[in-house]
Image: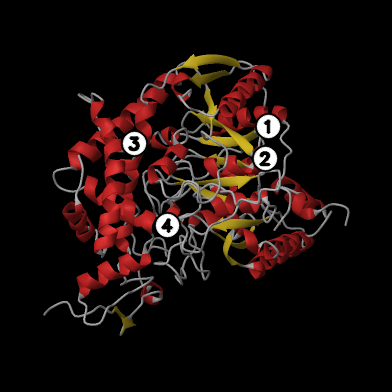
Amino acid sequence: MMTNLTDLGVAAIRDGVKNGTFSAREVAEAFNANVAAAADLNAFIVTTPEKALEAADAVDTARAAGKALGSMAGVPIGMKDLFATKGVQTTAASHILEGFTPQYESTVSSNLWAAGAGMLGKLNLDQFAMGSSNETSYFGNVISPWRRPGGSNAQLSPGGSSGGSSTAVSARLAPAATGTDTGGSIRQPAAFTGITGVKPTYGRCSRWGVVAFASSLDQAGPMAHDVKDCAIMLGAMAGFDPKDSTSLDMPVPDWAAALNSDMKGKKVGIPREYRMEGTDPEILKSWDDGIAWLKDAGAQVVDISLPHTKYALPAYYIIAPAEASSNLARYDGVRYGLRDLPEGAGLQDMYAATRAEGFGDEVKRRVLIGTYVLSAGFYDAYYTQAQKIRTLVSQDFENAFKECDVILAPTTPTASFGLGEKSDDPLGMYLNDVFAVPASLAGLPAMSVPCGVNSEGLPLGLQIVGKAFDEQGVMNAGLAIEERAGFTAKPEKWW
Amino acid sequence: MSVNKENVAKIASLARIKMSDDELERMVPELNQILGWVDQLSEVDCTDVEPMTAVIPNTLRLRADVVNADPKTGGDRRDDVLANAPAAEHGFFGVPKVIE
């Protein structure tokens, strides 16, 4: 065959299948083969080649019968193992959910299958999506396909928590993957691996059937090679769902059809507080490149202020653990998952033993922090204060958006780092999300788009944050950057 | 604010996570580092600021008052509900003896 099918993205696969250039089955087989050959990357917790083939055959049959095909028809994808998939183990990368086989399908994955996508497997992640390097999974680290040049074989982080997703897309094991973003978990891994990821407005994608971490922040989104692929996939994932009380009851625009990189008449805000002391000069340089590209696309650049930026991350590390400690109370060894029942133990001992055995260190740390900040005597000082700061962070954005249409900033303070380099420094790890968390706290749509490589040859990403419900404006600006960045770097295959 | 080993043991007990002495010792400095860092929030004057309750303005809906309006969240799913239980007997979740 002339084209290497695994080099193609969502749009090219969908259109090729529709036009009969190749069959959906051929595509699924090609990606299944890449998945099977990439065990070294540890991107998948379980692989489901038969599911990918089954979905592909259904698309090929529908096409042969002259039926209308869905927006993702013939596209095999990776599913982050945080989405409940009927009959397929769903673990959140934890021991406590090992062997858990949902009896139902999450809304987002249902939507994707209804649009004609197929499942290559369940992707590894940080345990319960808590982590920024994919080193907290019970099923082992995910290894980035990227390496520093010069013969160093040091294993690099694919970012987290959607590290299996970023590795799978970057290494061409899947043309696209689902991610979830609570405080940067789509954008940071996308930036670390040279791919594109979109966190939509809070409420766009249903949380029903997504293992809960911090419910007021959790939001699913697409991770793929380019902006158009993300726009297509987000269109398939999003939509009102009465089963999620925070689901947005509003129409889903055809983002892919309306993509337009002409920025004439648009104002791009540059938040001065993001120019933090100690930020890698190469990151600042990439930011300047992004400013120049958006100007070239016709945008006017304006200086803006988000005065409470420095408080966003500490507020997040109160709010997210508080919600997590409450959400994770359901893992009790009674209804599903692991049970550790020591000889002669009562109910309370069983809870404590099960949770000790089933949760990893980072999960325990956050559950303890969350329990502490919600406990009597500390609730107001920590939790209420953090929620007030959250209001202020949100108001900062509201004020800024009086002066601009979108905001441009780096996605991360550094490029990817080596596995193990930060894992014994929880606080240092948290600082990875310093640029990503403010948009999460405000529930705003945001994306990361690749913008180049640093002097070590590792990818860097730029972040665009938009007004609530304006995914279109975010992706349009992302497209303007994509067209000008000319990002073509790929990891050299070593696995 | 900072915590000592006794505080951490109390928190772990509230969170129903069994922890050994070694683990408690290890958690103390880790938690104190994080708590020390989040303490900077107290320097922000939040007089007259309302705590955030809903990040995107939304209204809570009521579903139609119909039994099993959505079969996925309706009743009559006992076997599905029990399918992943570590111990299920006679249509119930099994637990160790609760009443002494």
Point out the tag, 2 or 4, that comes first from the N-terminus.
4
Q: CA distance from mark 3 to mark 4?
A: 24 Å
Q: Chain of mark 1?
A: A
Q: Which residue position holds label 2? A: A226
Q: Which residue position holds label 3? A: A314
Query: Which type of secondary structure does the marked residue at label 4 adopt?
Result: loop
Q: CA distance from mark 1 to mark 3?
A: 32 Å
Point out the tag, 1 or 3, that comes first from the N-terminus.
3
A131 or A100, nearer to the observer: A131
> Label 4: few (<14), some or many (≥20) within 10 Å?
many
Q: Using the image, determine if residue A341 lies above or below residue A224.
A: below
Q: Is residue A60 left or right of residue A376?
A: right
Query: How far across and how far down the image is residue A358, in percent?
Result: 37, 66
Q: Which residue position holds label 1? A: A482
Q: Which residue position holds label 4? A: A211
Q: Residue type at mark 3?
A: Pro
Q: Are marks 2 and 1 in contact (CB under 8 Å)?
A: yes
Q: CA distance from mark 4 to mark 1?
A: 32 Å
Total marks shown come to 4
Query: Which type of secondary structure does the marked residue at label 2 adopt?
Result: loop
Eye-nearest disc, 2 or 3: 3
